[in-house]
Image (cartoon, grey):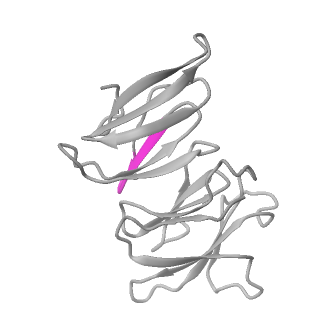
Amino acid sequence: MGAPTIDLSFPHSWEAEILGARPLILPRRSYVYPLQAEEVERGALEVLVRPIAPGLEPFLATCALGFRDPSVPTGIWSTPHPDCLCAVAGGYAYWIDTTTPEHFTMIAYRPVLQVLPVFPQGPSRMECLLFVGHRSILAWDKNGQIWESERLSDEGVTVSAIDEGLLHGTGWQMRSDAETRFTLNLLTGKPA
């Protein structure tokens, strides 16, 4: 795997550090994502999170590794919700509330192939994180999942541009054995 991504594009109310290994002495608060992971420490992403709000203690987020493939992302992203952090370990993505870290959501795509922050532009006031999978795309804003696109590909979605409230890309279609272009409305996830 390559170096982890750290994308703090959205304003956030926490600081986070990706650790090279699990600390010998764990912080008082320590969480494993997902809760039922087997052998979670093998290749897990270890993130020390320090919420900025007074009275909140730092905690260790141990995120189970999805795949060791260098083509899937690993790292941390700030989100449209300033208290939430998105951690991705080998394509397994976790949306974690840093004020109550026992509350998290594991993003449905396994693996997530790309994480893209989207900011207000043109007529669109959309602010979200996009999770690109093999066949479709999920969009999450500060309140959670807002849409999932229709199937865009049989195996491999490529996002080529985001502009004026539209997402442009291609997807490979098995029947035609060709890349097909698509354009989605960022507010709805529907074809534009």
**Percent coordinates x, y for residue 179 in the rendering:** 53, 22
Instruction: Specify start and end residues of the magenta stretch as a single range.
Output: 137-145
Where on the picture, by quarter, is residue 155? top right
* 134 on left or right of 14: right
Q: Residue at x 56, y 30 (%)?
A: 135
Q: Nearer the viewer, residue 35 or 86?
A: 86
Q: Is residue 144 visible?
A: no
* 168 on left or right of 18: left
**Percent coordinates x, y for residue 112 in the rendering:** 59, 46
Q: Nearer the viewer, residue 14 or 33?
A: 14
Of the 4 image quadrants, the one containing the N terminus is: bottom right
The relative height of residue 143 versus residue 42 in the rendered view (above or below) is above
Q: Nearer the viewer, residue 181 or 94?
A: 181
Q: Residue 140 lies in magenta, yes or no? A: yes
Q: Residue furthest left?
A: 123
The relative height of residue 89 versus residue 149 in the rendered view (above or below) is below
Q: Is residue 128 visible?
A: yes
* 159 on left or right of 1: left
**Percent coordinates x, y for residue 186 in the rendering:** 32, 39
Q: Residue 108 lies in magenta, yes or no? A: no
**Percent coordinates x, y for residue 165 in the rendering:** 26, 40
Magenta span dominant secondary structure = strand
How many numbered circles does the render carry?
0
Of the 4 image quadrants, the one containing the C terminus is: top left
